[in-house]
Image (cartoon, helix red, strand yellow):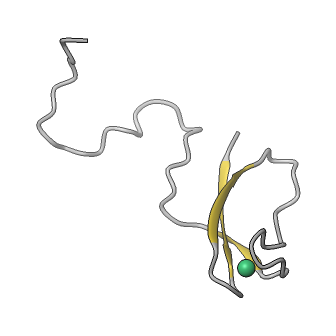
Amino acid sequence: MPTYHYRCKSCGYDFTEQQSFTDDPITTCPKCGLEQVRKVFSAVPIEFKGSGFYRTDGGSSKSSDSSK
Ligand SMILES: [Zn+2]
């Protein structure tokens, strides 16, 4: 299920919500109760892309964790 990122324009409350594609978008802020919530499209790691998306670090970490 995709995770959507919302932000309230009134109080600035920032939250994510797991919804299906058929769910209605959230418009009411769970914090202040006003209908000022907008969907935010940002760098939230949404994970419905499968593999090949996660390893963008480019670090020097090996992919073999021993001792576990
Ligand atoms: Zn609010």
Q: Left of 31 or right of it: where is 67?
A: left
Image quadrant assignment for residue 8: bottom right
Is residue 56 positioned above or below 16 on the image?
above
Q: Residue at x 74, y 73 (%)?
A: 31
Identify the image quadrant of the N terminus.
top right
Outermost residue on the top side: it is: 67
Q: Ligand 1: which quarter?
A: bottom right
Q: Position of residue 49 (x, y in %)?
A: 54, 38
Q: Quadrant of the C terminus?
A: top left
Question: Who's the residue at 51% across and 57% down the image?
Answer: 44
| Residue 27 rendering spot, x and y as whole percentages | 83, 72
Name, please, the residue furthest toward the bottom: 10
Quarter of the figure with residue 10: bottom right
Instruction: Tell me how many marks there are.
Output: 0
Identity of the residue drawn at 59% across and 67% down: 41
Residue 2 coordinates in the image, percent (x, y)? 67, 45
Closest to the observer: 46 or 66?
Answer: 66
Asked where in the image residue 39 lies, by quadrant, the reply is: bottom right
Q: Is residue 13 above or below residue 60?
A: below
**Residue at 72% across, 75% down:** 38
